C-alpha cells in the first residue's frame, strides 16, 4: 500500500517537473515572440489596431443610430466618427493653443532667464574664488571658455541638425496624414462589419484558447493603459491647477510634464514639487510652498487611492517589475518603449497564466 502512494507521489513530481520545464520553454518563446512582434509586425499593423479601437469607441453610437433612428450602417458609422473627431479636435485645439502661447512666452522671455542665470553663475563663481583662495574672476574666466565652446557647438553643429531634422519632420507629417486617412477609412470599414467579424471569430476552431488570451489581455492590458491614462490626466489637472494658483505662466506645460514624470514608478511628482516648495520657503514665499506641497500630496493621494481600484489585483504587476519593463522597453524600442515595455510584460504574464492553466488541466 505504501509503495502505491509513493508511486503516485513520484508520478506527480515527474508531472510537475515536466509542466515546469514546458512553462520555462513557453515563457522564453513568448518573450521572443512579443519582442519580434513589437519590432517587426507592430509597425505594419499599428494603424489598423488604432482603427479597431476607434471603431470600438464609436460602435455604441453607431448601433443606436442604426437601431433607434434606422440609419444605414455606413451613414451611422460616418456620423459617429465625425462626432468623435470633432470633439477630439476641439479639445486638442484648445490644449495646443495654450501650450503654444506658453512656449511663446518662454522663447520671448529667454533673454531675461539667460541674464538671470548669468548673474547667478557669476555669483557662484565669485564664492568659489573666495572659498579656494583664487584670484577674483578666475572661475568665471574658466567658465566663459567652456560657455564659448558650447555656444560655438550650438551655432555650427546643433542648429544645422535642427534645421535638417525640421525638413525630415515635415516629410513625416505628410506621411502621417496619409496614415491618418488609412486609419479613418479602416475605422469605418471595421465598425460597419464588426458584428460579422465577431460571428466569424467565434466559429474558429481555436476560438476558446484565443478568447482566454484576448479576454485576459483586454482585461489586463487595456485596463492598465486606461488606468494610467486616467491617473495621469487627473494628476495633470491637479498640477496645472496648483501652478495656476501660484500664478505660474507655464502652468499647463509644467503640469503635463509633471504628470508624465509621475507616471514613472519610484520617481513620481515629488522629485519636482518637493524641491520646488523648499526653494519657495528659502525665498520667503511660504504660501506658494504650501500650495506646491498640497499639490504634491493631492497627487499622491489620487495615485494611492485610484491605482488599486482601477488596476485591481488581476493585472499582477508590482512597481519594481514595471520599472524593469520600462527600462528594458526603452533600451529596446527607444521612447516608444515607455509604453511597449509594460504592455509587453502584461502580454507575457497573461499568455503564461492561460498556458499554465491549460497545462495543469491536461
Image: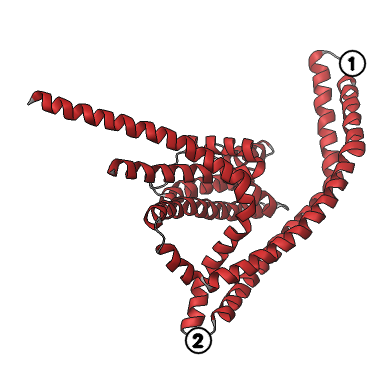
Q: Residue furthest bottom?
A: 70
Residue 181 location (% of width, % of height): 69, 66
Tell me if 359 is positioned left or right of 274 in this view: left
Query: Going from the N terminus, do you reach mark 1 or mark 2 first?
Result: 2
Residue 348 location (% of width, % of height): 47, 42
Question: Is residue 251 visible in the rendered structure shown here?
Answer: yes
Give the structural element (helix, strand or loop) at label 2: loop
Count how many numbered circles sit on residues in the image.
2
Q: Residue furthest top?
A: 133
Q: Is residue 40 above or below residue 2?
A: below
Q: Residue furthest front?
A: 205
Question: Which quadrant is the C terminus positioned in?
Answer: top left
Residue 135: give its label: 1
Residue 168 location (% of width, % of height): 82, 50
> Who is closer to the viewer here, 299 or 185?
185
Name the residue at 44% across, 54% down.
214
Question: Is residue 289 visible in the rendered structure shown here?
Answer: no
Tell me if 209 is positioned left or right of 168 in this view: left
Amino acid at each position: 500500500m505504501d509503495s502505491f502512494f509513493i508511486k503516485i507521489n513520484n508520478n506527480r513530481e515527474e508531472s510537475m517537473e515536466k509542466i515546469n520545464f514546458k512553462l520555462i520553454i513557453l515563457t522564453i518563446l513568448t518573450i521572443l515572440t512579443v519582442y519580434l512582434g513589437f519590432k517587426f509586425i507592430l509597425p505594419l499593423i499599428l494603424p489598423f489596431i488604432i482603427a479597431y479601437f476607434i471603431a470600438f469607441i464609436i460602435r455604441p453610437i453607431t448601433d443606436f443610430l442604426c437601431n433607434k433612428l434606422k440609419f444605414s450602417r455606413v451613414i451611422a458609422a460616418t456620423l459617429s466618427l465625425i462626432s468623435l473627431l470633432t470633439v477630439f479636435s476641439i479639445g486638442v485645439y484648445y490644449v495646443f493653443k495654450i501650450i503654444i502661447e506658453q512656449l511663446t512666452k518662454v522663447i520671448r522671455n529667454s533673454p531675461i532667464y539667460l541674464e538671470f542665470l548669468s548673474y547667478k553663475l557669476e555669483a557662484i563663481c565669485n564664492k568659489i574664488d573666495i572659498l579656494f583662495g583664487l584670484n577674483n574672476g578666475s572661475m568665471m574666466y574658466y567658465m566663459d571658455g567652456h560657455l564659448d565652446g558650447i555656444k560655438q557647438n550650438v551655432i555650427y553643429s546643433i542648429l544645422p541638425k535642427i534645421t535638417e531634422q525640421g525638413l525630415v519632420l515635415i516629410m513625416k507629417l505628410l506621411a502621417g496624414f496619409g496614415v491618418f486617412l488609412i486609419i479613418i477609412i479602416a475605422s469605418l470599414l471595421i465598425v460597419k462589419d464588426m458584428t460579422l467579424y465577431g460571428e466569424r471569430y467565434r466559429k474558429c476552431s481555436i476560438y476558446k484558447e484565443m478568447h482566454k488570451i484576448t479576454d485576459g489581455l483586454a482585461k489586463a492590458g487595456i485596463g492598465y493603459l486606461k488606468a494610467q491614462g486616467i491617473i495621469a490626466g487627473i494628476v495633470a489637472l491637479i498640477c496645472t491647477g496648483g501652478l495656476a494658483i501660484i500664478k505660474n505662466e507655464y502652468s499647463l506645460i509644467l503640469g503635463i510634464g509633471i504628470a508624465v514624470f509621475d507616471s514613472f514608478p519610484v520617481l513620481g511628482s515629488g522629485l519636482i514639487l518637493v524641491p520646488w516648495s523648499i526653494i519657495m520657503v528659502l525665498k520667503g514665499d511660504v504660501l506658494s510652498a504650501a500650495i506646491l506641497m498640497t499639490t504634491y500630496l493631492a497627487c499622491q493621494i489620487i495615485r494611492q487611492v485610484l491605482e488599486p481600484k482601477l488596476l485591481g489585483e488581476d493585472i499582477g504587476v508590482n512597481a519594481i517589475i514595471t520599472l524593469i519593463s520600462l527600462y528594458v522597453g526603452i533600451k529596446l524600442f527607444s521612447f516608444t518603449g515607455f509604453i511597449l515595455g509594460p504592455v509587453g510584460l502584461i502580454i507575457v504574464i497573461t499568455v503564461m497564466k492561460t498556458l499554465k492553466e491549460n497545462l495543469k488541466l491536461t
